[in-house]
Image (spheres, rainbow, N blue to C red):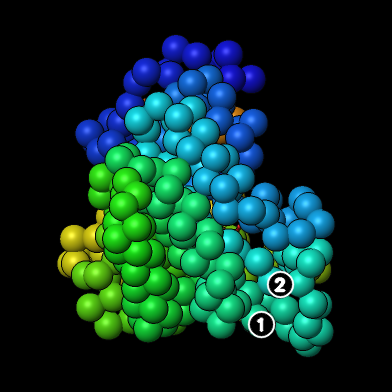
Amino acid sequence: AQERYADLRGLPAQSLCGAVVSLTMNAGLMADLPSLEGSGAEGVGLFRTELQFLARPNVPKRGDLAALYARVMDAANGRRVVFRTLDIGSDKVLPYMRRVDEPNPALGWRAIRLTLDKPGIMRMQLQALIRAAAGRPLSVMFPFVAQFDEFREARAHLLDEVERERRLGHKVPEKVEIGAMLETPSLAFAPEQFFALADFISIGGNDLKQFFFAADRENERVRRRYDTLNVSFLTFVEQIVARCREAGTPLSFCGEDAGRPVEAVCLAAMGVRALSMRPASIGPVKSLLRRVNLEDARAAIDASRAAGDQSVRRAVTDWLGNVLR
Ligand code: PEP
Ligand code: MG
């Protein structure tokens, strides 16, 4: 399928109005990295680090993790890789961790909540990332941040570890970028100091949608009930875009919806300028973005919103049908 989009590989995802959308890929294994070349992704916008923790009977060793992260950076060959720290709990349970029974695991002790409470694992992973980067830029993103202090605390752990490595005489990263995933509605309303402190923000659309609509992403009965192109959700995304713009904070969107061409066009029309997706989606998303005018997409969305539609999908697909004819 990637062959179909091969001619687009070196071209930007530039829409007819001139807006350029940066397209990166999601990964989680060393084996995903070769897709960088084939897909034309500009980098790795989301490297999910939990697999190396899940697929084994005990906690991985720092040295092994550092070696893997270094190989990932080598394979990216200078392109940016955003490493997301351990996102476990909820659906992803470590085999060597005592299972905690929680009535609502998705709302429970997971991701940054768990690693801030047990900083040993977080610090070990951060050390591995710092050592892997040695002399190169490092981008780290914390998952599931619900309030400013969680980000501040996690960020302090990372900066402490960089200092510690420096004192130990180890080579430290050339620069460190620290971002947060916006996956809970609360974070969109954080004080402006949060937006100023974050080097970048990435919307985790899968979780954000789940919490925005209070609809379990794993539950087939409710999962499809709420459209991503629901006006409430798009309006919310628009507000996040505005807050990031005010603060000058780069924003991306890295949930599954980023890889669906119609959704990608709508997100871009709301002002999102970076999307991260599975590698096979880069071609189709780029192809559509290059064929449309985002200002016209926005006009179709706004008209649908003004008409009181629940979802703009119908209006947008009708508009697309005309444009692509
Ligand atoms: C998300 O929530 O959208 C996301 C990218 O993270 P994950 O799917 O790993 O929870
Ligand atoms: Mg998530």
> Are the residues tagged 1 and 2 within 8 Å (C-beta)?
yes
Three-letter residue code for mark 1:
Gly
Callout 1 secondary element: loop
> 251 or 173: nearer the eye?
173
Q: Which disc is residue 108 wearing? A: 1
- Residue at 39%, 43% in the rendered image: 133
Residue identified by numbered label 2: 90
> 272 or 89: nearer the eye?
89
- Residue at 33%, 27% in the rendered image: 12
Q: Is mark 2 within 8 Å of ligand 1?
A: no
Image position, residue 291 (x, y; %):
39, 28
> 272 or 30: nearer the eye?
30
Three-letter residue code for mark 2:
Ser
Which residue reaches farthest bottom?
A: 103
Callout 2 secondary element: loop
> 293 or 113: nearer the eye?
113
